[in-house]
Amino acid sequence: MAIFRQYILPFIIVLVFLVSLVAVTARAFLPGDMAAPAPIEEPSQTKAAIPTVPTAIPTPVEAPLVTSPVVETPQQPQGQS
């Protein structure tokens, strides 16, 4: 187990770091149009895509307060074990 902790796991961590470093650095050498983030399509303005808020939802002031019942545990008298 000590070999895994001292040699293998640090090697895997360094390897993942180096792979991510190469991937990020490679963006500098890509053509200008490929180095930019992916374009985001604008959402269509249809009525079906716009969610509506129901009006029958009670506000926090109108909502009833729900509490859990208090459960008391029986206690033994002090002189007994």
Image (spheres, rainbow, N blue to C red):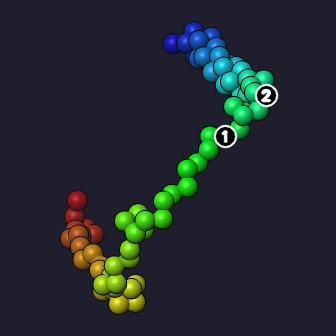
**Mark 1 secondary-structure assignment:** loop
In the image: residue 27, left or right of residue 70: right
In the rendered image of this protein, does residue 81 appear above or below residue 75? above
Per the model, the C-alpha gap separating discs 1 and 2 is 13 Å
Q: Amino acid at mark 2?
A: Ala
In the rendered image of this protein, does residue 8 appear above or below residue 74? above
Instruction: Of the two numbered discs 1 and 2 on the same chain, state the one appearing first in sequence.
Output: 2
Give the number of the disc on residue 9: none
Q: Nearer the viewer, residue 29 or 65?
A: 29
Q: Amino acid at mark 1?
A: Pro
Can residue 13 be seen by looking at this rendering? Answer: no
Can residue 76 be seen by looking at this rendering? Answer: yes
Residue 65, percent from left and from top? 32, 84
In the image: residue 66, left or right of residue 43: left
**Mark 2 secondary-structure assignment:** helix
In the rendered image of this protein, does residue 48 appear above or below residue 65? above
Q: Residue tagged by mark 2?
A: 28
Residue 53, percent from left and from top? 38, 76
From the image, which quarter does the C terminus lie in?
A: bottom left
Residue 9, percent from left and from top? 59, 17
In the image: residue 43, left or right of residue 10: left
- As drawn, the residue found furthest toward the bottom would be 62
Q: Residue at x 68, y 24 (%)?
A: 23
Say which quarter of the image contains residue 59. bottom left
In the image: residue 37, left or right of residue 47: right
